[in-house]
Amino acid sequence: MYLVGFMGAGKTTLARALGARLGWRAEDVDERIEAREHRTIAEVFARDGEPYFRSVERQVLLDLLPLRHTVVATGGGTFADLENRALINRDGLSIWIDVPLALLVDRVPSDGRRPLAADRARFEQLYETRRAGYRQAHYRLDAEQSPVPALVEQVMDYLDA
């Protein structure tokens, strides 16, 4: 199972909660990138640029594909890539955590920890652009008002249907 959505949507938090509920492991693409690179995402972007980051992201995704009984929290841009999206949708269930832009602006600091959030105009444009890709997920969770336990229940209901 793959959780997709914009930065700040809560993919990592929900992946851990779903993993605990299902008795599955939870994996985070960004955390794996940082472990592999021995530096933060911001440092990867600053030193090597976004194309390099995306190549590492793809390799991490390829490493995760064979795993089963795993909830994967993807990075905000992972599913925006056509090839990654195809790999994810062929491999398992993709769930889009849909959070309105106004809420994400409140959640995601523009202090440089998230390189693509530093410029708010670009952040908003990226949000609009990526939504087209996120719409290709198998299932959409409206996460505007829902706490994590309620989102877990919505996913469980979907899985049971």
Image (tube, grey):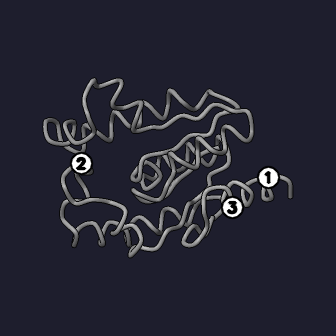
Query: Which residue is drawn at the image coordinates 46% and 68% (left, top)?
Result: 131
Q: Amino acid at mark 2?
A: Arg
Give the spatial CA distance, label 2 vs label 1: 35 Å
| 67 up-or-down from 93: above or below | above
The answer to whether the residues at label 3 and label 1 have Cβ atoms under 8 Å apart is no
Give the mark nearest the N terminus, 3 or 1. Answer: 3
Image coordinates of residue 76 in percent, x first then y, are: 41, 53
Give the mark nearest the N terminus, 2 or 1. Answer: 2
In the structure shown, which secondary structural element does the residue marked by tag 2 occupy?
loop
| 144 up-or-down from 76: above or below | below
Q: Amino acid at mark 3?
A: Ala
Q: Which residue is mark 2?
A: 113
Q: Which residue is mark 3?
A: 150
Q: Which residue is mark 1?
A: 159
Q: Quadrant of residue 48?
A: top left
Question: For the N terminus, which image quadrant?
Answer: top right
Give the mark nearest the N terminus, 2 or 3. Answer: 2
Residue 72 vs residue 61, the one in the foreground: 72
Give the spatial CA distance, label 2 vs label 3: 29 Å
